[in-house]
Image (cartoon, rainbow, N blue to C red):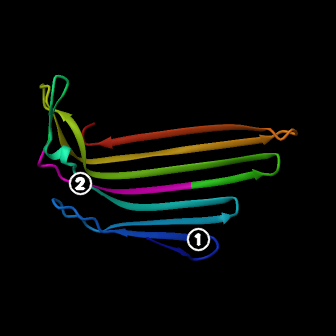
Amino acid sequence: QSSFEFSDKLTTQVGLRLPYHSLYSANLIPSIYFKYDFNKNNQIRLSYSKGFRSPTIKELFMEFIDINHNIIGNSELKPEKSDAFQMSLALLPKYNDKIYWSVNIEGFLNLLNNKIELARLQSSDVYTYYNLTKSTYYGTNTFIKFNIKSKMNTLSSFNLMWNMFLIKNDSF
């Protein structure tokens, strides 16, 4: 991983991982991140990374059978691979000794291939793991923070947060 400052306003970080797995081949996994400061109070951040997750021993081979469970591993599972995008905007419009307020808006998009899920086998009580071919996760987070300092130096803080998270995949 390495960081670079192109100017007082633009910073970037790049990374590269080379995973090793004894059962699955994995490609290089890159990541890149940018931060741009419009001024001392406002900035935007952008990032992208690839992902890789191989199935666990439990997901591949374990049999968990008791009075409450009937889960069978699946040795045919493929590894998960993903692309993740994120963006955030931080604004600090008002700041002085008495009043401070800020707004953060974040968004993300995750594209997953071969996501590993647990599913019931038809109309039985048996469960196993399977690969969900394509899944898309996306959403936003918005935070508004408002602080007021009184004459007696006590701080009152008000926070408002709104989240939206959506999933789209082959199953639905």
Compared with 112, 124 (above or below) is above
| Residue 86 is inside the magenta segment | yes
Give the distance between the C-alpha atoms of the residues marked 1 and 2, in whole angstroms.
35 Å
Viewer-nearest residue: 77 or 65: 65
In x, y percent, where is residue 93?
72, 52
Q: Name the residue under label 2.
A: 54
Which residue is located at x 42 percent, y 61 percent? 48
> How many callouts does the rendering have?
2
Q: Residue furthest top?
A: 67
**Residue at 24% from the left image edge and 65% from the top image edge:** 20
Task: Give the numbered dot on residue 87.
Answer: none
Q: In which quarter of the image is the C terminus?
A: top left
Looking at the rendering, the stretch of residues picked out in magenta corresponds to 74-88
Considering the whole magenta stretch, tell me its main secondary structure. Answer: strand
Quadrant placement of the N terminus:
bottom left
Task: Say which element carries label 1.
Answer: strand
- Asked if residue 93 lies left or right of residue 103, the reply is right
State the residue lying farthest toward the right: 151
Comes first in the chain, label 1 or label 2: 1
Rendered location of residue 145, percent (x, y) = 67, 43
Q: In this view, does 35 lie above or below 105?
A: below
Graded by Cα atoms within 10 Å as few (under 14), some (14 to 19) or many (20 or more), the crowding at tag 2 reads: some
Which residue is drawn at the image coordinates 58% and 38% (left, top)? 161
Q: Which circle, 1 or 2, is nearer the viewer?
A: 2
Instruction: Please name the residue that numbered disc 1 is placed on.
Output: 10
Residue type at tag 2: Ser
